[in-house]
Amino acid sequence: MISDKTILVTGGAGFIGSNLVETLLGAGNRVICLDNFSTGKRENVQPFLTDSRFRLIEGDIRNIEDCRKAVDGVEYVLHEAALGSVPRSIKDPVTTNEVNISGFLNMLVAAHDKGVKRFVYAASSSTYGDSKHLPKVEDVIGRPLSPYAVTKYVNELYADVFARTYGMECIGLRYFNVFGRRQDPNGAYAAVIPLFVKKLIAHESPVINGDGEYSRDFTYIDNVIQMNLLAIQTENPEAVNHVYNTAFGERTTLNQLVGYLKEYLAIFDAEIRNVEVIHGPYRQGDIPHSLANIDKAKTLLGYHPQYNIRAGLKEAVKWYWKHL
């Protein structure tokens, strides 16, 4: 485990970012969090505020001066700040572009100018677009299906150019449907797992887009943390300046997902087994199936994910039962 380093986590008050902050502080690092709280939550970083090794900068990656301030004295950047959600990007492509592309470029420039050792960033499985190739391998992508997907692909292009042009060390992690503790179940763009959990706990019918046979490679947060730590720590020169699938490598349909959630939530409330599911229309911009090949991450980074969908859901459900 990396320790005694100075690490910036952008979007550190968000779901993934706050979990990374917690892990890095626990390992004895100095951690800076840059967040504008547009989607991040203050309660996610509240427990860290009394830790002298933690520093919160309330700022926006769209402002390059905020970025320069945040990277000052930093050895590693974990760039998690972004506007997620395919539907949000379809409704408001301009803001998604400003945050995910202009903000990303600001962070690259600031990191380069301040001599940051390595820049690890959140990429996305949405980059695979309309490619029907399964499982997804890093060098076979299709055309993007949403403005969000465009922005995440452009991030990869910019990181590659900065590596080639300025000699930066960049590693992109293509996240596949991450879930777990602190993922927000509220709001118009809540992810499917916390949204379904919230509905089921309230004995309300979750709505599945389509017939429920679309499938995803759902990835528990601790697998994502492992990948970020490996990306920071690797000393293998062949592992740098690549993008990696960050997933478990198994496919689960939405119908299976609801079945698992009912099973694990029914441990706390047996009535949840009887909650009916509603099927709605397919969602624009959704790909039918997503499954990652994780061989590249295993080979070059030594990645070995510990949580499959069932093990991850058991942990997530326990957390939600306590906090919802």
Image (cartoon, helix red, strand yellow):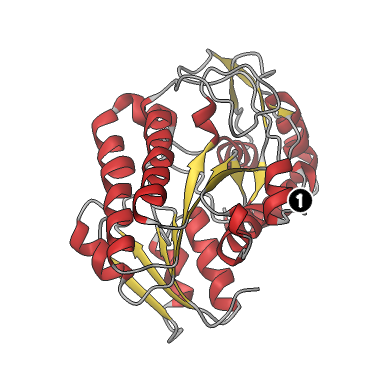
Percent x, y of residue 205: 61, 27
Percent x, y of residue 66: 23, 63
Quadrant in the picture for residue 50: bottom left
Q: Is residue 166 above or below residue 158?
A: below
Residue drawn at 41 percent across, 23 percent down:
146
- In depth, the one of 313 and 284 nearer the eye is 284
- In depth, the one of 310 and 223 nearer the eye is 223
Q: Is residue 170 left or right of residue 225?
A: left
- In depth, the one of 164 and 200 nearer the eye is 164
Q: Is residue 323 above or below residue 49?
A: above
Q: Is residue 298 left or right of residue 82?
A: right
Quadrant showing the N terminus:
bottom right
From this viewpoint, is residue 248 visible? no
Quadrant in the picture for residue 79: bottom left
Percent x, y of residue 90: 35, 24
Quadrant in the picture for residue 10: bottom left
Q: Is residue 229 above or below residue 242?
A: below
Residue drawn at 62 percent across, 51 percent down:
180
Q: Is residue 2 left or right of residue 147?
A: right
Residue type marked 1: Tyr
Residue drawn at 65 percent across, 22 percent down:
289
Percent x, y of residue 31: 45, 74
Residue drawn at 39 percent across, 31 percent down:
148
Residue, disc 1: 307
